[in-house]
Amino acid sequence: MAEYKLLDLFAGGGGFSTGFSQASFSDHRFKLLRALELDDFACQTLETRYGAASVIKGDITTEEVKEQIFKECQGVDVIIGGPPCQTFSLAGPARSGSKEMRERLKNDPRNTLYKHFLEVVEELKPSFVVFENVEGMVSKKADSQLNDKQGQIIELVCDELESLGYCTNLEYNFTERYQVLNAAEYGTPQFRRRIIIIANRFGLVNPVPEKTHVKQYETIQNAIGDLPVRLPKISSRDMKTLKNIDIIKKYYQQSLDFFMNQIHQLSQRKRIHGEHHVLLELYNELNEIYRNIYDKKRYKIRGLEEFISVYNELVIKLEINKYGETTINQTHQSREHNFRDIVIFSAMKQGSNSARFMNPENEDYSKILDEMYPYARNKHKDTYVKHSFDRPSNTILAHMEKDGLKFIHPEQPRTFTPYEAALLQSFPKDYSFSGMRNAQYRQIGNAVPPKMATAIGNAILKTITENSIDPRRNEIRTHEPV
């Protein structure tokens, strides 16, 4: 078996290196030599997966860390990495934040980390380079004095790689130097478009990874549909000051009905993992307090607080969140939600969002949810997004560490757990992430989907094999004439 040494820069939680480690072609594989990462929890994740000796923890912009990379990674065959570039994203404050926020991001030193990536390439001279970034990088300019194409950072990266002796041209389209891949077309149950540059030192056109899922994508149902139920703790703190609590009081009975109907439907559907009877018991016991407070004309908040308290106690008493394999219990736990959001989650239709339920002309319009929506309407209206089991997920974002409102579970009144987010990113089922929940969300949301990375790795291995390339000597093998 031929193994090619791999260096993963800006490795994060290890999605890129995991995918490359799973690639194989004609008995050729990649073996991780080193992974560079700055974040403490991500480093712990990598060390658990690959061993402490394989991880370099530090800041690539420092000479000390660069020297360590140069010393420990001589003879590396492939360098992969996706330098964080905060203002390139098509989502988040880079596009929608305040003027001050956008200015801070513009001057963020993380936006020039790609230069340090290229510096490492120049020193180590690997046979292949794979550069990954968000699709928004296509429109990001490095210098406003240059014309549109000349000023694009993506074009400058390609230019720099070529100046270092690398070919960036693509097969099938020799005029293009980068490609935009959608992870869903490579078996990831998630729509996620990313820029990929593949470059080599042999003057060969670079491969376009073969799509494995074009007519039929992997769905959320296939990825997480059979996982044990996880129900959230409902916060009752500061109920009187919860935004739009007056709307919940106005639609007091309907709000209770939305949630109770969701629990009842769940108890009828979930007949795996031995959960059906406990969910039914939860519903039946909740019904008692539900009937007691349902017709309240006064003290409605007190009634809601009593209902929430009984619900939270029952979830613990019935050990609902402990069902299933113990290996996934650490990361397959829901974050806490307030009652307003629980009502919204329960009332929304699968595949819908707040922009739809606030639009009177849309079939998903709900007068109650329209009034209950708590955020400014002059910015984003799709704050709440409830996913559908029969399609892939939307792009999993690191923003999930802040809130998960764009990632509402199709049938459970909560947002995705870290374990679900990791499966929707195509991480292996036994992959373990270090840190508390927010650190896990951050690692998962920033990752390159392993299945897409595997497709890229397979394409490179195929190129190596079919062209009789000897990466260790940076040359194409020549055959003696017979």
Image (cartoon, grey):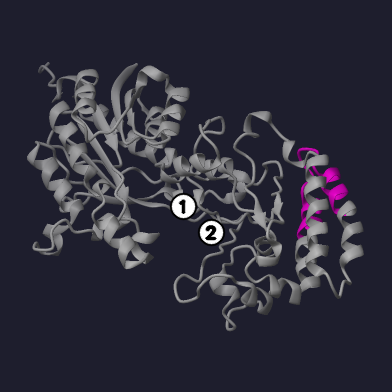
Q: Is residue 144 left or right of residue 185?
A: left
> Type of residue at label 1?
His
Q: Residue at x 81, y 71 (%)?
A: 253
**Residue 277, magenta (yes or no):** yes
* Mark 2 in CB contact with mark 1 (< 8 angstroms): yes
Residue 428 got which mark?
Answer: none
Residue located at (16% from left, 46% from top): 158
Q: Is residue 470 visible?
A: no
Relative to 183, 217 lies left or right = right
- How far separated are the C-alphas under marks 2 and 1? 10 Å
Q: Under tag 2, what secondary structure?
A: loop
| Residue at the disc numbered 1 | 399
Residue at 39%, 42% (x, y): give it: 448
Position in image of residue 434 (x %, y %): 51, 31
Residue 234 on image: x %, y % = 71, 53
User: Main SS type for the magenta part?
Assistant: helix
Which corner quadrant of the image does residue 278 belong to?
A: top right
> In the image, residue 23 lies at what x, y percent?
39, 30
Q: Is residue 79 magenta?
A: no
Residue in the foreground of this view, choosing between 321 and 204? 321
Residue at the spot 10% in from the left edge and 18% down from the top edge: 481
Q: Is residue 458 positioned above or below 306 on the image?
A: above
Of discs 2 and 1, which sits in the foreground? 1
Q: Which residues are magenta?
A: 262-283
Picture layout, residue 211 above or below residue 26:
below
Q: Quadrant of the C terminus?
A: top left
Q: Nearer the viewer, residue 32 or 434?
A: 434
Check disc 2 and report the residue beneath it: 406
